[in-house]
Every structure is written in C-alpha cells, then in structure tokens.
C-alpha cells in the first residue's frame, strides 16, 4: 500500500520525464555526413524536458576496419541556419566489426524550435602508426 502511494505521489508531482521524438513529429530534421570508412545511421532527436538528446549509430563502410579512430560531431542549427550548439563525442564500442554497429548519445541544453536541423558527422582521427611507415 505504501509503495502505491509513493508511486502515485511521484506521478502527480511531475517527476515523470517527457520524451518526444522530434524527427517523427517533424520538429527537427536530420542531416548526416559519412566519412570514408563509416556511415552515420538511425539518428534520432528527442526532447527530454529542457535537454535535446541526439542518438544514432555508426556502421563501417565496405571492408575498412574502424578501430576507434574518430569522433561523432553534432551541430544543432536553428531554423534560420545559425548554430545553436555543437559538440563531439566518442562512440561505443570503439571497434566497429563487420556486420555490427557502434552507438552514440549526446545531450544539449537546448529546447529545439520547429525547423531545427541536426547535422551529424563521423570525424576520423588518423594517427601515424609504425606499421604504416610513418
């Protein structure tokens, strides 16, 4: 009985989190920029209270091995094309094997207005490796 009262009080007090899919309701559109070795896919944008949450996947392209050598860059553009916010994050797992994908999630302190554009790109970081002769 006490548990039911606590749950009812939490729901009534507004402790629930709202999560609207902004791509499905056409508030936000998504642009993806693939790199030579990866393809950005399944990007979603959600509004969780006052945070804009961007999620997606990276899949390797062709026979290239992708072993954690890059970042995912996200730019949030307002309806007029101005940059609202931007950032970079790592993806998990860092090694993208054939037939698998890696995921990423980024949070921005933004309430997205209708017409917002989310641009997501994989940015490879190439390192000199002794086996490459560099």
Image: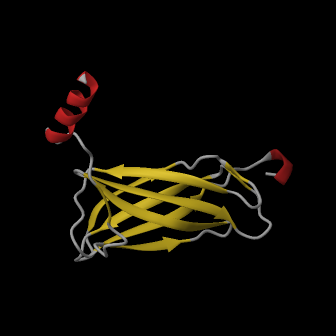
Foreground of the two, 107 or 11: 11
- Colour pattern of the rendering: secondary structure
Compared with 96, 15 (above or below) is above
Residue 30, position as x, y percentages in the image? 41, 72
Reply above or below: 132 against 21: above
Q: Which residue is drawn at 76% across and 70% down?
A: 62
Q: Residue furthest left?
A: 13
Residue 131 in percent (x, y) is at 85, 48
Count of numbered circles on the image? 0
Residue at the (77%, 48%) spot, across then down: 129
For residue 26, what is the image quadrant? bottom left
Q: Which residue shows up at 17% across the image and 33% down it?
A: 9
Q: Position of residue 86 (x, y in %)?
A: 35, 57
Give the residue at x 25% y 30%.
4
> On the picture, is 64 further left or further right than 74?
right
| 113 left or right of 46 in image | left
Q: Which is nearer the eye, 3 or 25?
A: 3
Where in the figure is residue 11, as x and y percent of width and height?
20, 40
**33 and 2: which one is in front?**
2
Q: In which quarter of the image is the N terminus?
A: top left
Q: Residue furthest top?
A: 2
């Amino acid at each position: 009985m006490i548990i039911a009262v606590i749950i009812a009080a939490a729901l009534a007090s507004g402790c629930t989190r709202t999560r609207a899919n902004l791509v499905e309701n056409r508030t936000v559109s998504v642009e993806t920029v693939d790199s030579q070795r990866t393809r950005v896919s399944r990007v979603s944008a959600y509004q969780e209270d006052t945070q804009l949450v961007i999620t997606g996947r990276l899949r390797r392209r062709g026979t290239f091995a992708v072993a954690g050598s890059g970042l995912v860059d996200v730019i949030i553009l307002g309806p007029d094309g101005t940059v609202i916010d931007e950032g970079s994050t790592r993806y998990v797992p860092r090694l993208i094997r054939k037939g698998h994908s890696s995921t990423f999630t980024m949070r921005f302190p933004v309430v997205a207005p209708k017409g917002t554009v989310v641009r997501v790109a994989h940015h490879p970081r190439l390192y000199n490796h002794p086996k490459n002769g560099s």
